[in-house]
Image (cartoon, rainbow, N blue to C red):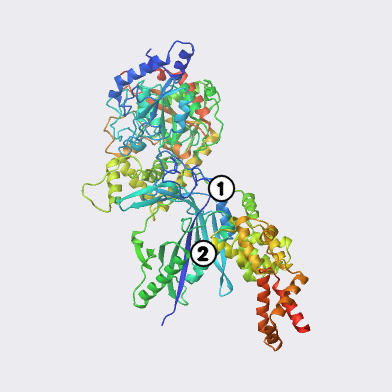
Amino acid sequence: MNLFDLTANEILKKIQCSELKPSALKAAIIERNSLVNPKTNAFIRTPDAVTILNTDGDVLPVGIKDNICIKGHLTTCGSRILDGFRPPYDACVVEKLRGAGNVIFGGLNMDEFAFGSSCETSFYGPSRNPWDLSRVPGGSSGGSAAAVAAGQVVWALGSDTGGSIRQPASFCGIVGLKPTYGRVSRYGLIAFGSSLDQIGPLTKDVTDCALLLNVIGGFDPRDSTSMDVAVPDYTQALTKDVKGLRIGIPKEYFIDGIQPEVLTAVNKAIEVLKGQGALIVPLSLPHTEYAVATYYIVATAEASSNLARFDGVEFGLRAMPSVPRKSSLLDMYEETRAQGFGNEAKRRIMLGTYVLSSGYYEAYYLRAQKVRTLIKQDFDKAFNECDVIISPTSPTTSFKIGEKMDDPIAMYLSDIFTIPANLAGIPAISIPCGFDSASLPIGLQFMAKPFAEETVLRAAYAYEQATPWHERRAVL
Amino acid sequence: MTTFETVIGLEVHLQLKTKTKIFCGCLNEFGSAPNTNVCPVCLGLPGTLPVLNRRVLEYGMKVGLALNCSINSFVKFDRKNYFYPDLPKGYQISQFDFPIAKLGFLDILVDGKEKRIGITRAHLEEDAGKLIHDTVNACTLVDYNRTGTPLIEIVSEPDLRSSQEAYDYLTGLKLILSYLNVSDCDMEKGSLRCDANVSIRPLGQIKLGTKAELKNLNSFSAVKRAIDFEVARQTTVILSGGSIVQETLLWDEAKGRTVSMRSKEQAHDYRYFPEPDLVPFIIKSDVIENMRQSLPELPQAKLSRFVSAYKLSTYDAGILIQDQSLADFFETCAKSYPDTKKIANWINGPILKEMNERKLGLTQLHLSPLNLVKLITRVEDGTISNIAAKDLLSDIVLTAKDADVLIAEKGIAQVSDDAALEKIVDELLAQNQKTVQEILSGKTTALGFLVGQAMKKTQGKANPKKLNDIFTRRLHHA
């Protein structure tokens, strides 16, 4: 087996019994990157010995999405407007990773400001799916998913606002977890939708997912929305035992329009879990159909405000028109933002500005917040009847690069099953559950109530250990 | 001719003097070198998050309670979105629909009668940075030291009817705020800023006229002048058949007039929405109650107590309560000296004069209450004259020396010893026979000459009252 195919858990064991030297691993990873990054474009900037930030004793190469701040290291959110921006501080999760023996590899590609489901809106060019380089790796954490699937890093961090960890994990055949809102500090995560964003692990298997969550979880006084809830050892949840676990099947997630192979794979997964002693509970989450609309109001509203700071004054790109138009200040604002943001970012800033505008606020933003409460209540009720909810992660497997770029609505709908967990703030995981006829990975999603990460990990691990999907590697 | 009524509402921005800023740990300090009290959070760097300074909330509650407001136990912040280079995040964190305090009042005196001015609301927010226009290099620089300084904005009801009422409201407000010790209240340093909403309407009309918002008011007297100017302008416009346009005006102090800054059409749509980075929370009612209990005695209450407990005139008490340190000083003196009127006279007279001349606060003068009482006592027991005592006060405030020590050092104890004085009087009477004759023939003013001579002989140490008595006695028994 190649060193770059090992999971973090396997590496740690090998190092412990001196079968592997950290330096050998690091060399293998660097070699792997120089070989495959030109194909995947997972890293915006190919990591080399100069950009790798580590100290002695750091072992595990971890990839960091380009919207998580690394002190002194380019952090650009896949956008031109942050060209040249080097944060003077580390994100909370980066601090924690450094303290836990990780070698930091920054600059994993992403949709610009995490606006997208395909990694195609990055200013630095799209990333490609390691299973089929003509296809997207998903998004927005497409670089993170592609890098893990291609063995460019051992594991990676992404961020998930409406499915941005889980959908790319699904497309790339790996494990991706969006923790409970408040489980992981957002300090140092460049905000998209502040009330939805959550940093989470993208890993080769469920064990690594639990290990990485152990490192990054926990209260941070610098993030008022992080919760002071104890972090258990999540590996303790990996018992293979799902006997009596009540698995809810929401009818709204098994609908027409889902790729038939996806539906088949998920139904088979349900059978596997049933065979392991899980109880199946049919249920309804009646407000699911409003989730996408609600999300695109709340998320864009917050984004329009969060992105106001990219104005050319303090950091990043500053541009002036060649012919003066208004005042020099307005000229600078307009030209900087016109040149600095891509089309999708502009579209979302305009949407968000519109829904917050005087006279429209009540009809859009306020109503969306009310519907958000209803969606959350759907889940509250459902979790009285079941312990974990199962669904496809995405209605389809990976699509071709360019296929949906001219159809934003079709693109938005690829997050239809992942968005509700963000609106409700609940933990959700995507794990591989098969391959379609084009040999593209299919993802299975588990959701549980707030701070029940152990429950999703327990269900995911039991299923994973009963199936071979997590052992397959993309060939590059 | 139509008589118009002036309607004014004031918005006061007050910087709260907490040790650190409202959402980060940077020092909240005026006058530091540019961009030294800054960190990633107050610079609004990508990825940073605000954390509310607990002290700011406490100060906000104090201000609200002192202004008789009800406190919103539901604490929530909102984003006010607009672009300006002094606002690094592109939005200001403020409070929109749940201000920390609402529906209070402040009483002012109008023509000797109390008038109640409503307080609409007081909300917490962060201050912006400061733009410095470099005219030499034709560029604008930003100093972010002020960014994130905690502010409370106090909005009054449109209850004020003249520029004088506005002035008195501001004075009263500032006094209360100074008692709370939550702000420097210094308009020159910008720790207290005021905008005025001004409109006029025909007397008797209920409906409010179209208002203009006056900005750039740099002192209370500027507020007064700007309002007077604006009222006159609006009156002229209406009388000449025009109508008032809702706009924001800048007061030009040097030219003594207002200039238009922006019209209503150009007004910002701030797109307020709840700040998702700060989670709303509830203040427990006992916390609010404890805060109410811990408020200091406020000026109005102190005034009433000084009048009733110390039998002071409203005028004297009114001066004392203008400065909390004066009031405290007075009370300490009153504990060891019964004549409170005399203490008040000393504080409101010579001591205030010393403070004003030296531009120092009472606490900066080296005067202890006990030393003042000693000084007053020495005048009373005839050891020194009133004039000598005032001179002595000037020495004390500089040196902190004990009054008795200074009297001894300077040898200015009055000569009240009858024998010594009688000897001098006899000598003088013998030497000035002509004057004696004049006095005896009715020209009593000539006595002053003799007393003056006696003072000269004693180098001013003689007790003049005593001299007068002896002269009179000797002359009439001669």
Q: Judge whether residue A390 can be spotted in this image.
A: no
Residue A124 horizontal/vertical position (percent): 29, 32
Where on the picture, by quarter, is residue B456?
Answer: bottom right
Q: Is residue A346 above or below residue A232?
A: below
Image side of residue A439 versus residue B175, left or right: left
Q: Is residue B102 above or below residue A293?
A: below
Q: Is disc 1 in the same subunit as disc 2?
A: yes
Residue at the limit of the structure toward the left, as seen here: A323
Residue type of the residue flagged with mark 1: Arg
Image side of residue B236 versus residue B346, left or right: left
Residue A469 horizontal/vertical position (percent): 40, 20
Give the secondary structure at mark 1. helix
**Which one is nearer the viewer's eye here, B454 or A452?**
B454
Residue A458 horizontal/vertical position (percent): 51, 24
| Label 2 sits on residue | B170
Question: Residue B55 — which label?
Answer: 1
Where on the picture, by quarter, is residue A258?
Answer: top left
Q: Judge whether residue A337 can be spotted in this image.
A: yes
Residue B398 horizontal/vertical position (percent): 60, 57
**Which one is nearer the viewer's eye here, A269 or A133?**
A133
Mark 2 falls within which chain? B
Residue type of the residue flagged with mark 2: Leu
Picture quarter with the N terminus of chain B: bottom left
Q: Is residue B441 above or below residue B237?
A: below
Q: CA distance from mark 1 to mark 2?
A: 25 Å
Tally of numbered tags:
2
